[in-house]
């Protein structure tokens, strides 16, 4: 892969860093574009963006250090030396960012669920660029496989799954779907905050599916921490979606029952005529 994009005598530009910058700018652009549809002030939204990123980064680092406590211990120096001891938790970053934005919204009188409908598509875009950068730079390596669609990494034996690339493409798809959902929410086709429920479910489903295809996994009792969190999120929001779509599900079930009953009556009638 390509960990260093440009290696000059006086400057070294890392590929993953470039994609993180792209993730920030494209995510910020999408955020700005979405909030043009609202009456919120631009300065409030971008202040919230930087506060969210700061909170997300801090929580992400804390979670990562806690999950790798055997490597960090109680050393404050290792906590802050990210170049020497790299590592961030994506779940920690998302939770920290959303929590920071929620607290900021309380101060600025911004309705959290309503605002999140406009934030989600930008979040997906940023995640898509981040995962694409992780794939191209080799920051995230997939597990060994004999699957034809795979890649060989320098210094590692065997061919590897294109895990980060798959996640990147699905996150970009999530950006498209959440953007479409935003306009359905604006037309009151779905309740405010529905995009947040969609994001939580979609993100958890991706991580639950692709986490087994990764090398660096933190496990407890034989299960990945990310898989446990993803499974809990999926179960929680599955209940939410079942409750929200209960009328449609009941109508569908009722319609299927009628079709089976009608088919059964026809079969009985044909059998009776033959006899």
Image (spheres, helix red, strand yellow):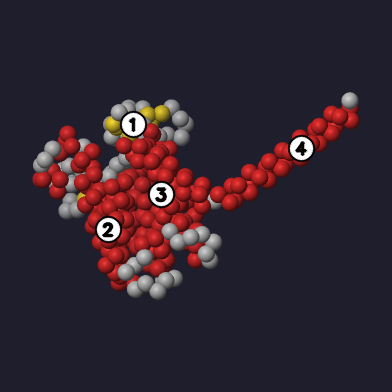
Q: Residue 234: x and y, percent?
A: 43, 43
Q: Which is nearer the N-term, disc 1 or disc 3?
A: 3
Q: Which mark is residue 200?
A: 3
Front residue of this view, candidates 22 and 37: 37
**The label number, if any, that marks residue 245 in the structure image:** none
User: Label 3, label 2: how many angstroms apart (C-alpha)?
Assistant: 17 Å
Q: Which residue is pictured at 34% across the width and 67% down the height?
A: 110
Q: Distance from label 1 to label 2 (Cα)? A: 29 Å
| Left or right, 233 with reference to 4 | right
Residue annotated with mark 2: 100
Q: Are marks 1 and 3 in contact (CB under 8 Å)?
A: no
Point 11% across, 40% down: residue: 74
Q: CA distance from mark 3 to mark 4?
A: 40 Å
Residue 178, compared with residue 39, is above or below; it is: above
Q: Nearer the viewer, mark 3 or mark 4?
A: 4
The residue at the point 36 percent across, 37 percent down is 227
Q: Which residue is mark 4?
A: 263
Q: Earlier in the sequence, mark 3 or mark 4?
A: 3
Which label number is shown at residue 223?
1
Tell me what residue is drawn at x 15 percent, y 45 percent.
79
Q: Is residue 151 visible?
A: no
Q: Alpha carbon of mark 1 to alpha carbon of mark 3: how far?
A: 20 Å
Give coordinates of residue 43: x percent, y percent. 30, 72
> How many residues crowd mark 4 within 10 Å: few (<14), some (14–19), many (20+)?
few
Label 3: state its secondary structure: helix
């Amino acid at each position: 892969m390509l960990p260093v994009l440009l290696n000059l005598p006086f400057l070294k530009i890392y590929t993953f860093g470039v994609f993180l910058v792209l993730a920030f700018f494209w995510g910020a652009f999408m955020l700005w574009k979405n909030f043009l549809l609202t009456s919120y002030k631009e300065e409030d939204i971008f202040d919230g963006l930087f506060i969210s990123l700061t909170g997300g980064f801090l929580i992400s680092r804390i979670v990562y250090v806690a999950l790798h406590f055997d490597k960090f211990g109680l050393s404050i120096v290792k906590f802050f030396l990210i170049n020497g001891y790299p590592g961030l938790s994506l779940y920690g970053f998302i939770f920290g960012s959303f929590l920071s934005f929620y607290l900021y919204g309380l101060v600025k009188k911004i309705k959290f669920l309503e605002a999140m409908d406009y934030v989600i598509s930008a979040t997906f875009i940023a995640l898509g660029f981040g995962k694409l950068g992780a794939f191209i730079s080799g920051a995230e390596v997939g597990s060994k496989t004999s699957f034809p669609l795979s890649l060989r990494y320098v210094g590692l034996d065997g061919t590897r799954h294109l895990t980060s690339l798959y996640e990147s493409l699905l996150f970009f798809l999530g950006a498209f779907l959440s953007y479409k959902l935003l306009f359905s929410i604006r037309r009151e086709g779905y309740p405010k905050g529905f995009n947040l429920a969609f994001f939580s479910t979609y993100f958890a489903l991706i991580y639950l599916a692709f986490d087994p295809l990764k090398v660096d996994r933190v496990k407890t009792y034989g299960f990945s921490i990310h898989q446990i969190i993803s499974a809990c999120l999926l179960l929680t929001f599955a209940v939410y979606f079942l409750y929200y779509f209960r009328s449609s599900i009941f109508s569908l079930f009722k319609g299927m029952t009628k079709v089976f009953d009608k088919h059964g009556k026809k079969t009985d009638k044909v059998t009776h005529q033959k006899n």
